[in-house]
Amino acid sequence: MKFTFQAKSTNNASKSVYLNITLSPEEAIIHKDNLLPGESISATLTVENTGTVDAFYYISTDWSPDDSSTQIQATRLAHELEITVEAPDPTILYSGKLAELINQPKNGRLLTLDMIKEEITFTITLPSTASNSLARIGITFDLIFVVT
């Protein structure tokens, strides 16, 4: 037995939307030479929804050695440094190793058109249990925001 089904929808409409977020400041927000075990440094970044719809964003890091360090040294440091990402509600969006900050928070962070923008605080800590030799290793990292 052959069966065929067809349905028509006469009230279809399509609409273009614009997904965009703006980060400020645009320059580096965290600078610290020789972070010692047990020390922390914090900085704040403003995330603004400049699109036309509510949006979710995710944060990742891309890190590399600076001019004074090797890839192996930077890898060691990235796996020791702890980073906490906190929203103002207060909500911890991520807390863990810098090297593992990939597409966090897991379900994204909603930034509605009603909210427009929010301040996100990043705190980098070299645990007190880390070796003093890590203080001399240089690392550069970018915070990457993806919007969906």
Image (cartoon, grey):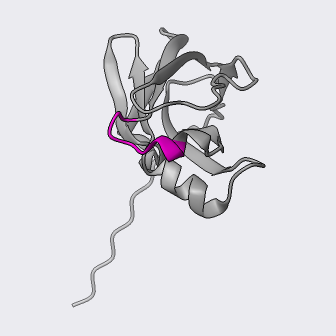
Res 92 → quadrant:
top left
Q: Magenta stretch: dominant SS?
A: loop
Q: Nearer the viewer, residue 5 or 127?
A: 127
Instruction: Name the residue rendered at 52%, 45% in the picture.
Output: 134
Instruction: Name the residue rendered at 66%, 31% in the picture.
Output: 18
Decide: is 34 above or below 87. Answer: below
Instruction: Name the residue rendered at 37%, 35% in the picture.
Output: 127
- Residue closest to the far front: 132
Decide: is 143 above or below 119. Answer: below
Magenta span of residues: 127-134
Location of the N terminus by quadrant is bottom left
* Residue 113 shows in this picture: no
Q: Nearer the viewer, residue 99 or 36?
A: 36
- Residue closest to the far left: 1
Q: Residue 133 magenta-drawn?
A: yes
Q: Nearer the viewer, residue 109 or 102?
A: 102
Residue 108 horizontal side relative to residue 34, left or right: left
**Position in image of residue 105 (x %, y %):** 38, 37
Residue 107 horizontal side relative to residue 51, left or right: left
* Residue 109 shows in this picture: yes
Decide: is 4 above or below 72. Answer: below
Q: Residue 140 magenta-drawn?
A: no
